[in-house]
Image (tube, rainbow, N blue to C red):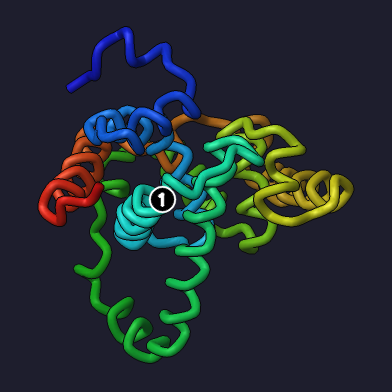
C-alpha cells in the first residue's frame, strides 16, 4: 500500500501545501513516514500499547484539522510530535481519575494481551521492552526520542521545552539505568516496533475519518 515513488521524494512542507489545497490522499504519506516515531513517543509517555495507537489516531486527525495553520516556524515533524505529546499527556491526566478501575483491570490476567507483546516473542526483545518501559517517564521519553528515533538534541529540546543540558543529563541517566540490566544490548529497532499491519490500521482509520467527515 505504497504511494507513488514521486510523492515519496516530496518534502513535508510541500506535501502539507498540497494536502491543504485539496489532495487529501497525500496525508497518508505523512502518516506512514511518522507512524514509528509517533507510536514510540506516545508509548513512552502512556506506557500502554493500545492507548498509544488510539492517541496516534487522535493526534493525526487533530493535525489534519489544523494543517492550514502550520506556518513552518519549526519542522512539520516537530509540530506533529508536539501535538502527539499533548494528546498523550491529556490521556494520562484523564487516566489518573480512573486509577482504581485500572488497577482492578490489571489484576485480570487476560487484560492487555497486546499485539506488541504477542509479536515480541524472543526473550531478548521482552527484556528490552520491559527495561525501557521500566524507566521513569522523563528519562524514558528522552531516551526514545534520542536513541530509538534518533531525533536531534535541538529537536528534542524544542519538543519537550528542555535545555540542552537537561536533555543530555536525562539521556545519560536513562542509559545508566538500562546498562545495569542490558549492558550493550539496550539499543534495538525492535523495541516498541510499530509493525506494518498496525501502520495500515492507523492510516486506514484516519483516512476513513477524513473522508467520512468530508474534512477539507
Position above or below: 42 against 94: above
Circle 1 residue: 63
How crowded pointer 1 is (Cα within 10 Å; few <14, some 14-19, many 20+) is rated as some
Q: Left or right: where does residue 28 sit relative to residue 10?
A: left
Q: Left or right: where does residue 72 sit relative to residue 83?
A: right
Residue at 64 percent across and 46 percent down: it is 181
- Near-viewer residue (73 or 114): 73
Position above or below: 118 against 11: below
Residue at 26 percent across and 35 percent down: it is 22
Is residue 202 at all visible to an observer of this figure? Answer: yes
- Near-viewer residue (39 or 83): 83
Residue 73 found in image quarter: top right
Placement of the N terminus among the 4 image quadrants: top left
Residue 186 percent across, percent down from the top left: 60, 36
Residue 198 percent across, percent down from the top left: 24, 40
What secondary structure is found at the residue carrying circle 1? helix
- Number of numbered labels in the structure image: 1
Residue 29 percent across, percent down from the top left: 32, 28
Is residue 127 at all visible to an observer of this figure? Answer: no
Residue 107 percent across, percent down from the top left: 30, 80
Outermost left residue = 212
Q: Left or right: where does residue 211 sit relative to residue 77?
A: left
Q: Left or right: where does residue 187 sit relative to residue 24?
A: right
Residue at 27 percent across and 37 percent down: it is 199
Outermost right residue = 165
Outermost front residue = 21
Residue at 45 percent across and 24 percent down: it is 14
Amino acid at each position: 500500500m505504497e504511494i507513488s515513488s514521486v510523492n515519496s521524494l516530496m518534502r513535508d512542507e510541500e506535501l502539507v501545501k498540497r494536502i491543504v489545497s485539496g489532495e487529501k490522499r497525500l496525508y497518508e504519506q505523512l502518516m506512514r513516514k511518522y507512524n514509528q516515531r509517533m507510536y514510540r513517543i506516545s508509548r513512552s509517555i502512556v506506557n500502554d500499547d493500545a492507548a498509544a495507537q488510539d492517541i496516534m489516531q487522535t493526534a493525526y486527525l487533530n493535525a489534519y484539522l489544523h494543517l492550514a495553520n502550520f506556518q513552518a516556524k519549526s519542522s512539520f515533524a516537530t509540530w506533529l510530535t508536539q501535538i502527539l505529546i499533548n494528546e498523550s499527556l491529556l490521556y494520562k491526566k484523564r487516566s489518573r481519575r480512573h486509577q482504581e478501575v485500572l488497577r482492578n483491570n490489571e489484576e485480570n490476567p487476560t487484560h492487555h494481551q497486546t499485539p506488541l507483546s504477542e509479536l515480541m516473542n524472543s526473550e531478548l526483545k521482552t527484556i528490552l521492552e520491559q527495561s525501557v518501559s521500566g524507566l521513569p517517564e522523563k528519562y524514558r521519553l528522552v531516551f526514545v526520542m534520542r536513541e530509538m528515533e534518533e531525533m536531534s538534541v535541538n529537536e528534542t529540546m524544542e519538543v519537550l521545552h528542555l535545555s540542552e543540558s537537561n536533555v543530555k543529563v536525562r539521556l545519560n541517566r536513562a542509559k545508566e539505568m538500562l546498562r545495569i540490566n542490558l549492558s550493550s544490548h539496550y539499543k534495538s529497532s525492535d523495541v516498541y516496533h510499530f509493525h506494518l499491519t498496525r501502520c495500515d490500521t492507523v492510516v486506514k482509520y484516519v483516512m476513513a475519518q477524513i473522508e467520512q467527515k468530508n474534512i477539507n
